[in-house]
Amino acid sequence: MDIKDMNFTVVYPCGRGMCRKGVGRQDKQHNTYDYLVDVPGNDTSTDLVEVQFKNTRKGYYHNVNQLDLKKGDIVAVEANPGHDIGVVTLTGQLVRQQIKKANIRSEEDIKKVYRLAKPVDMEKYEEAKAREHETMIRSREIAKGLGLDMKIGDVEFQGDGTKAIFYYIADERVDFRQLIKDLAAAFHVRIEMKQIGARQEAGRIGGTGPCGRELCCATWMKNFSSVSTNAARFQDISLNPQKLAGMCAKLKCCLNYEVDDYLEASKKLPSRDIVLQTSDNDYYHFKTDILAGVITYSTDKRLAANLVTITAERAFDVIEMNKRGEKPTSLNDLKPSNDEKPRDLLEGESLTRFDKSKRKKNKPQRGNQQKRRPQNNRENNANNRQNHRDDAPQTE
């Protein structure tokens, strides 16, 4: 049988829940991995679907028409007024969990999915999206003309172009009744104003953090907890405002990620105010590696002088000796340590051991040299005879 006539099927296993069907569209923010996608009957267990719109805005809808919806399908959904265009990002049982996280309790907040988007719907959608940037610039000028202390950070048009949502930031309460009238007269659409914080604005716009990864608020973080400078103090991070601030000009949310581990590890360390006494000097706390459990002491209160680094266990031993009136000869533990330090297996190897050596220049072959020698001999003999003739006496 010819291989061209054979039929092949590519199999994508869904072992351990890591199925490619559960990933969805990766160009959307706040993606949810559907680990139940390979469970039989998951799609038919509920008619609820999750639909995502511009940036981080999501909505939940009933699939009343029993459409065969998959992740990535563009659908037209119910809106007030008209309809909106979005992308299906989640189906099945996990949609119920997402509704609980979104704190949606009323059934009236869950509207319907009308249909899969038609070419006519997409044309209106593209026309509406093309107006967003120009509308945002113009709306900022109108707000500035009214003297309002607010910043319009983003504008989102509804899929049918009949409504526009203006996202703004303001430190205080703003009376924008006149602004709504001016915006409606300028753009001839229904106006909705939504106030967001600096972190929500950064999540909507997106970007790359100083760690080199995409912003957490734009990828997975939905609920924002308060961040204080105490989180930086507990982790011994320098209180530099430029380094502690994120893209939103607020304290970085990642300061809270490891603060609990640092608090637990700091409980196993002695107080920084305790002075360790030896027979030679008094040692003051200089710095601490909290997670490693290592403390560095100095003989000067303010300067780094005669630094000695010891473990927390050794520090507690010295403290107990000082309480009994004893002073060790040194802070370093004189007992032999059984801990083996990590050994570099490639310590004696060269970094260029796999590099190709430079090729030497091609030397002329021996055959060519031998062929060249007789010619050189003939030339030398001819020169010698000419010199001999020149040296011979001339006769008249």
Image (cartoon, helix red, strand yellow):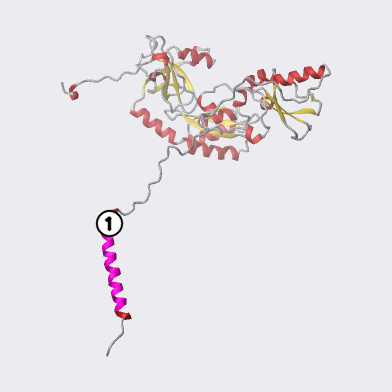
Where is residue 127? Give x, y as percent: 40, 34
> In this view of the protein, can residue 157 be seen by the observer?
yes
Left/right of residue 319 with respect to residue 372 in the rendered view: right
Does the stretch in magenta take in 372? yes
* The quadrant where residue 279 appears: top right
* The quadrant where residue 274 appears: top right
Where is residue 59? Give x, y as percent: 47, 20
The one of 205 and 300 positioned closer to us in this rendering: 300
The amino acid type found where label 1 is placed reads Asn
Where is residue 130? Give x, y as percent: 43, 36
Question: Who's the residue at 53% across and 15% down the image?
Answer: 101
For the C terminus, give its image quadrant: bottom left
For the N terminus, give its image quadrant: top left
Majority secondary structure in the magenta region: helix
The one of 221 and 4 positioned closer to us in this rendering: 4
The one of 159 and 39 positioned closer to us in this rendering: 39
Question: What residue is shown with label 1?
Answer: 368
Question: Who's the residue at 67% across and 34% down the image?
Answer: 240
Left/right of residue 50 with respect to residue 361 in the rendered view: right
* Magenta residues, start to end: 369-388
Does the stretch in magenta take in 3? no
Instruction: Give the residue at the far right of this rendering.
Output: 325
The one of 340 and 263 positioned closer to us in this rendering: 340
* The quadrant where residue 143 appears: top right
Where is residue 97? Give x, y as percent: 49, 13
> In this view of the protein, can residue 37 be seen by the observer?
no
